[in-house]
Image (cartoon, rainbow, N blue to C red):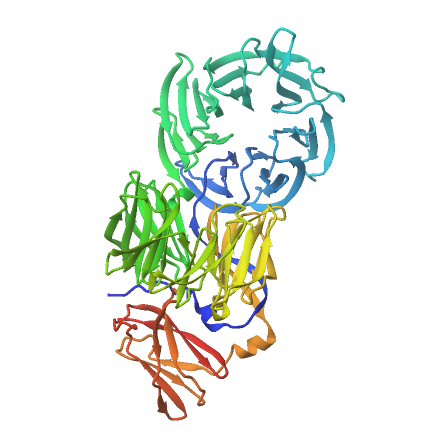
C-alpha cells in the first residue's frame, strides 16, 4: 500500500539550515489558488451570459450554462465590502472598497474573458459616511454626505468633473431624473418623501428645485436605506418597509405593492427586492429570502439562512434567479414552484489553516476537505452537522481538528493515508471548551477562558488519544516556524515564563514584562534560538534577546492603526497596511526589524514565508494562495551557509539504518535529526571513520527508543565551516 507522506513543506528547514540574514525579497508571484472560501454577501450582476459576483474578498466571474448552472471562469481579489453595490455600465464593472480614510472605486474590463482588472481611484469621500451611487450619461454620481453634495466622475477617464451642491443622501437616477429620498418638517410634522430633480437643468438644489414629490408618509417615521430601479419599476426599501412603483410616467407614479410593518424593528431592514410575474422576491439583513404573491398578499416561499444579505443580491436570468446569501451563492428555479436548485461556495467559517495545511467544510455536499499545500494533496471525508471550524494541526501523520458540531466543541483525530481521512477518535470538552489549541513537542495545549481568566490545559499525545497532564494560568506561545528544544513561553499577569518543553508544569525561569494592551491578547512568538517576540494581534511588537538566560529588549514598535494582520513566521514579519494597500515584509532573525520588501495587495492576509523553498502561503478572506518569490542574503553569511555537503544513504530510506557520510574530513561532533515541526527527534554521535570522511548511523528511532513514523525529516550539523543541513525521507 502506498504510504502518503504529509508535510513535504519542510517547515523548519530554513531556520535549521540558513544562518544568513535575508536582505531582500522580490518578484512575488502567484503559483496557484489552493483553497477557496468567502462571504457571499455582495451584489450579483449579469453581462453577456456571464455572472459577476461580488463577495467579501473577491469578484468572481461565472459562465451561465444552458441549464442555469454556473461555471467559474476567474476571480480577482478585492478589499473589504463597503455597503455600496457594484454595478455594470457598458463593458465595465465598477466596485467599491475602502482604505483607512476613504472609498476606493475599481474598474474591471468585462469585454474580455477572463475579466481584466483596469485600475483603482480614490473617490476622496469619507468612508465613515454612507455613500450612494448612480449613473447619468457618462457620469458616475457619488453622494458625499460629509460635505452635502454629489460628486460627478467621468466613467471613462474617472476624472472629477464637477458636483451638485446641497443634494446628497439616498438616491437613484432614472434616465435624466434624480430621485432623492428625504424628509422635511412642515411645521406640524415630518414629511417623508421622494423628490424628483431634472439633471438636464444646470442648477438643481435641495430642498427646492424638484419638479415632483411623492409623499411616502406624513405621520409616521420612515427609515429608508436603499432605492433601486429596474425595468420601469422603482423599489423603496427600508426598515420593515418595501414600496414598489410603476415609473412609466415619472410625474404620475402608480403604486403596485406596499409591504409595511407599522411597528418596525430596528434590527430588520430589506436589502433587495424584485418583482417577477406578480411575485415579490425580498431579501433582508437577517439573511431571509421571502416571496409574496402580490395579488392576494400571501407568503409563498421562505428560506432562512445564516449571516446577513447585503444590497443588490438578486440577479434574474429567467427561469433562474441568483442571490448571494452570505454563506453561499444560490441558484433558484422560479418558473413553477420556487426552489433552490444549487448552491456554490464555502464560507470562511468553514475553514482553518495551520503551517502548510488547510481544511474546509463543504456544508452543501457535507465533505471535510484537507489540503497538504506543498504536496498538492487533497483528502476528503463525508461528515454531517459541522457548524464551523476552529483550528487544526498535524502531528505524527495524524490530523487534529477542533470544530463545532450541534453546538458542542469537539477535538477529532484523523489518520491520513491513501488520499483518505479516517476518524479514529472524538474527544468532548465538558467544561471550558477551548478557543484554540497548539501542538508543541508531544503535548497539545488548549487555550480556555473560565469566565474570569485565561488558562491552558495541557494533554500528552498518546497513540490515538490524549491524556491530561497539567493546567496553568495564561496561554502558550504560538507556532512561528521555530520551536525551542528546551522550553516554551507562557505569558500571564505581566510575567513571561519559560516552561520545560518536556514537562510544561515546570517553570525554568520567569521575567516581569510590562507591555501595552492595545488590541487584545498578547502572544509569544519564537523567532529563533536567540530571539523571541511579544506581540498583540495588530499593532504592537517587542523583540527580546534570550542569550545566557537573560531577556534583553532589542526592538519595540507600536504601529499605526492602519496596520493590521501582523504575521511573524520563519523569521519574516508581514504587516498589512490598509492605507497603502500593501504588505510590508521585514527580517527579524537578528533581533531587529529590517525592511526587505513590499507586496502590493488590496487584501488583508496572514503571510507565511518559507525562504528555503522560495514559497509563501497567504491566507485571506478569499481563500489560500501559494506564491513563489526570490530573495537575497548578505554576502558573508551566504558564504557561511554553503559548507561541505553531507551525503545521506539510502534516501528515501526503507532499510533499518540511515547513514550520514561527511566528506573532506570536516569536523562534525554530532548530527541532530528533526521532524517537520522542528522538534528534536534524536542526536547522533560516536561517528566512525570511513575513508576520507566520517560516518554517523541512525537506527530510525527517537530518543525514547521508539521507531519513527514515515515522513520527511531534517538534519543539522554544526561544523567548523558553518551549519550543514538537509532533508531525508523515511518510508516503511
Question: Quadrant of the rendered structure where residue 645 is?
Answer: bottom left
115 to the left or right of 403: right
Quarter of the image that includes the N terminus: bottom left
Q: Residue at x 27, y 54 (%)?
A: 413
Q: Position of residue 716 (x, y in %)?
A: 42, 76
292 to the left or right of 552: left
The image shows residue 211, relative to residue 1, as above or below, that is: above
Outermost residue, bottom direction?
691
Frontmost residue, 387 versus 136: 387
Frontmost residue, 286 versus 453: 453
Q: Position of residue 500 (x, y in %)?
A: 37, 64
Number of numbered callouts drawn: 0
Q: Position of residue 239 (x, y in %)?
A: 49, 21
Frontmost residue, 305 versus 565: 565
Q: Position of residue 313 (x, y in %)?
A: 48, 31
Q: Is residue 408 visible?
A: yes
Q: Residue at x 46, y 24 (%)?
A: 268
43 to the left or right of 487: right
Amino acid at each position: 500500500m502506498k504510504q502518503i507522506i504529509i508535510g513535504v513543506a519542510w517547515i523548519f528547514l530554513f531556520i535549521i539550515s540558513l544562518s544568513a540574514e535575508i536582505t531582500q525579497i522580490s518578484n512575488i508571484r502567484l503559483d496557484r489558488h489552493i483553497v477557496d472560501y468567502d462571504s457571499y454577501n455582495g451584489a450579483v450582476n449579469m453581462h453577456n451570459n456571464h455572472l459577476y459576483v461580488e463577495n467579501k474578498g473577491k469578484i468572481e466571474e461565472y459562465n451561465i450554462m444552458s441549464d442555469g448552472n454556473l461555471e467559474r471562469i476567474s476571480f480577482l481579489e478585492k478589499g473589504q465590502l463597503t455597503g455600496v453595490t457594484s454595478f455594470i455600465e457598458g463593458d465595465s464593472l465598477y466596485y467599491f472598497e475602502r482604505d483607512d480614510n476613504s472609498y476606493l472605486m475599481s474598474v474591471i474590463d468585462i469585454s474580455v474573458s477572463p475579466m481584466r482588472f483596469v485600475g483603482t481611484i480614490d473617490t476622496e469621500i469619507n468612508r465613515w459616511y454612507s455613500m450612494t451611487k448612480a449613473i447619468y450619461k457618462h457620469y458616475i454620481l457619488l453622494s458625499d454626505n460629509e460635505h452635502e453634495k454629489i460628486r460627478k466622475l467621468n466613467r471613462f477617464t474617472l476624472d472629477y468633473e464637477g458636483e451638485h451642491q446641497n443634494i446628497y443622501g439616498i438616491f437613484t437616477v432614472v434616465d435624466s431624473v434624480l430621485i432623492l429620498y428625504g424628509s422635511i418638517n412642515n411645521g406640524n410634522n415630518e414629511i417623508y418623501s421622494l423628490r424628483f430633480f431634472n439633471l438636464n437643468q444646470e442648477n438643481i438644489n435641495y430642498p427646492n428645485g424638484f419638479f415632483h414629490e411623492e409623499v411616502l408618509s406624513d405621520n409616521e417615521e420612515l427609515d429608508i436605506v436603499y432605492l433601486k430601479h429596474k425595468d420601469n419599476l422603482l423599489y423603496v426599501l427600508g426598515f420593515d418597509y418595501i414600496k414598489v412603483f410603476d415609473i412609466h410616467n415619472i410625474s404620475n407614479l402608480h403604486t403596485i405593492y406596499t409591504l409595511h410593518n407599522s411597528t418596525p424593528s430596528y434590527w430588520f431592514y430589506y436589502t433587495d427586492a424584485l418583482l417577477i410575474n406578480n411575485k415579490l422576491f425580498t431579501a433582508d439583513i437577517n439573511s431571509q429570502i421571502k416571496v409574496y404573491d402580490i395579488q392576494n398578499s400571501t407568503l409563498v416561499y421562505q428560506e432562512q439562512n445564516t449571516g446577513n444579505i447585503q444590497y443588490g443580491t438578486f440577479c434574474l436570468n429567467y427561469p433562474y434567479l441568483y442571490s448571494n446569501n452570505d454563506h453561499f451563492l444560490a441558484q433558484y428555479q422560479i418558473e413553477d414552484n420556487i426552489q433552490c436548485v444549487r448552491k456554490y461556495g464555502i464560507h470562511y467559517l468553514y475553514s482553518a489553516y495551520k503551517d502548510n495545511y488547510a481544511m474546509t467544510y463543504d456544508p452543501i455536499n457535507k465533505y471535510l476537505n484537507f489540503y497538504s499545500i506543498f504536496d498538492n494533496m487533497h483528502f476528503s471525508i463525508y461528515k454531517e452537522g459541522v457548524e464551523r471550524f476552529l483550528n487544526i494541526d498535524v502531528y505524527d501523520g495524524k490530523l487534529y481538528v477542533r470544530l463545532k458540531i450541534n453546538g458542542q466543541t469537539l477535538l477529532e483525530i484523523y489518520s491520513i493515508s491513501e488520499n483518505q481521512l479516517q476518524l479514529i477518535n472524538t474527544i468532548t470538552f465538558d467544561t471550558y471548551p477551548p478557543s484554540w489549541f497548539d501542538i508543541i513537542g508531544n503535548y497539545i495545549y488548549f487555550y480556555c477562558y473560565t469566565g474570569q481568566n485565561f488558562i491552558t490545559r495541557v494533554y500528552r499525545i498518546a497513540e490515538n488519544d490524549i491524556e491530561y497532564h497539567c493546567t496553568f494560568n495564561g496561554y502558550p506561545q504560538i507556532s512561528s516556524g521555530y520551536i525551542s528544544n528546551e522550553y516554551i513561553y507562557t505569558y500571564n499577569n505581566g510575567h513571561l515564563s519559560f516552561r520545560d518543553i518536556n514537562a510544561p508544569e515546570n517553570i525554568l525561569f520567569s521575567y516581569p514584562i510590562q507591555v501595552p494592551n492595545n488590541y487584545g491578547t498578547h502572544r509569544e512568538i519564537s523567532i529563533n534560538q536567540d530571539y523571541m517576540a511579544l506581540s498583540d494581534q495588530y499593532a504592537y511588537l517587542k523583540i527580546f534577546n534570550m542569550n545566557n538566560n537573560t531577556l534583553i529588549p532589542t526592538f519595540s514598535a507600536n504601529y499605526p492603526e492602519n496596520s493590521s494582520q501582523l504575521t511573524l513566521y520563519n523569521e519574516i514579519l508581514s504587516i498589512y497596511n490598509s492605507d497603502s494597500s500593501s504588505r510590508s515584509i521585514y527580517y527579524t532573525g537578528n533581533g531587529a526589524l529590517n525592511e526587505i520588501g513590499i507586496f502590493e495587495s488590496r487584501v488583508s492576509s496572514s503571510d507565511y514565508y518559507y525562504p528555503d523553498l522560495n514559497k509563501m502561503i497567504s491566507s485571506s478572506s478569499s481563500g489560500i494562495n501559494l506564491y513563489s518569490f526570490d530573495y537575497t542574503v548578505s554576502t558573508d553569511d551566504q558564504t557561511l551557509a554553503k559548507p561541505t555537503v553531507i551525503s545521506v544513504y539510502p534516501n528515501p530510506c526503507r532499510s533499518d539504518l540511515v547513514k550520514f557520510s561527511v566528506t573532506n574530513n570536516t569536523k562534525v561532533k554530532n548530527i541532530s535529526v528533526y521532524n517537520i515541526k522542528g522538534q528534536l527527534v534524536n542526536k547522533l554521535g560516536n561517528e566512525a571513520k570511513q575513508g576520507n570522511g566520517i560516518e554517523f548511523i541512525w537506527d530510525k528511532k527517537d530518543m525514547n527508543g521508539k521507531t519513527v513514523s514515515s515522513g520527511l525529516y531534517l538534519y543539522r550539523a554544526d561544523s567548523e565551516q558553518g551549519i550543514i543541513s538537509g532533508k531525508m525521507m523515511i518510508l516503511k
